[in-house]
Image (cartoon, rainbow, N blue to C red):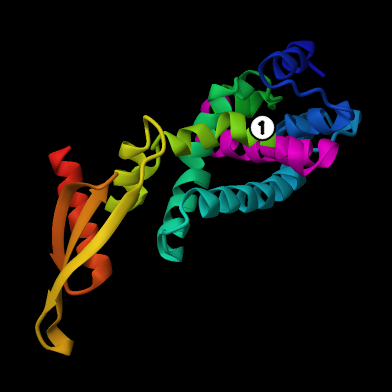
Amino acid sequence: MDNQLTNELKEKYTIVFHDLNLLEQAFTHSSYVNEHRNLQLSDNERLEFLGDAVLELMVSEYLYRLYPDIPEGKLTKTRAAIVREDSLSKFAKECGFDKYIMLGKGEENSGGRTRPALLCDLFEAFLGALYLDQGFEAAHAFLQTVVFPKVKAGAFSHEMDHKTKLQEVLQKSGDVFIEYRLIKEEGPAHERIFWIEVYVDDKLIGTGQGKSKKLAEQAAAENALAAL
């Protein structure tokens, strides 16, 4: 196993693998195995399978806790944005993993080291290996360092709604109390219109209307964001 990789993992993430064979497997591409059959190596595809499941569970739990008022559909969209190929390949590059993946000559010469699909698989394989080696807490701590800060900073907020965006903007400087108040509703039951005001620490910052309370709240949050 590359000593530089183990040193980087220790320095950047305080990760020291107990089973170095797992770490080596995570960084072994199938093309390398095919060109070195005499070494009886295992590629990272099985670890990728496991890491994919670990990642999805941990990201799901994180989003569930971070956004308590967001409906299932929005959470699903946001999770998909986080765990998709281009996002995970960027995380792998930021971790420097692309430098250490073991590739066959053909894969290397065709630019495999920069291929998003390959780097995405590598990131998942590493997470799977870490989970097997040290359990849930270690894998979760790694994601807390590499992935979750970007989620919290709003890197994927384009997948969220106006209420969530407003909450992220207002809470950048600390906790604030955000309240949506229904001020009036008019019209027959099948054509009801709702008016909502949004307050932060009892200060009015936006108003909106819609055919449901939820739509009116979204409109109020959107107007508040525009005003801010």
Q: Secondary structure at mark 1?
A: helix
- Residue 14, x across and y down, in percent: 74, 20
Looking at the image, residue 47 lies above or below residue 218: above
Q: Which residues are magenta?
A: 113-140
Q: Nearer the viewer, residue 159 or 19?
A: 159
Q: For mark 1, does the 10 Å Cα neighbourhood hold few (<14), some (14 to 19), or many (20 or more) residues?
A: some
Say which quarter of the image contains residue 36.
top right
Q: Quadrant of the C terminus?
A: top left
Report if residue 161 lies within the magenta region: no
Residue depicted at x 29% and y 44%: 201
Asked whether, in this view, residue 193 is left or right of residue 171, the answer is left
- Residue 23: x, y in percent? 80, 29
> Which image quadrant is residue 71 in?
bottom left
Q: Looking at the rendering, which quadrant does residue 203 occupy?
A: top left
- Is residue 30 something one can see in this rendering? no
Q: Residue at x 51, y 50 (%)?
A: 63
Which amino acid does the dot numbered 1 rest on? Phe
Q: Along the horizontal axis of the image, is 130 left or right of 79?
A: right
The picture places residue 104, in percent across and down from the top left corner, at 69, 27
Depth order, front residue of 133/28: 133
Q: Nearer the viewer, residue 59 or 44?
A: 59
Q: Is residue 117 magenta?
A: yes
Q: Residue at x 51, y 32 (%)?
A: 149
Q: How many marks?
A: 1
Residue 141 x, y percent position in the rendering: 68, 34
Q: What residue does disc 1 label?
A: 142
Q: Residue at x 71, y 25 (%)?
A: 102
Label the magenta part by its dominant secondary structure.
helix
Q: Residue furthest front?
A: 202
Q: Quadrant of the N terminus?
A: top right
Left or right: 119 with respect to 188?
Answer: right
Q: Is residue 223 above or below residue 33?
A: below
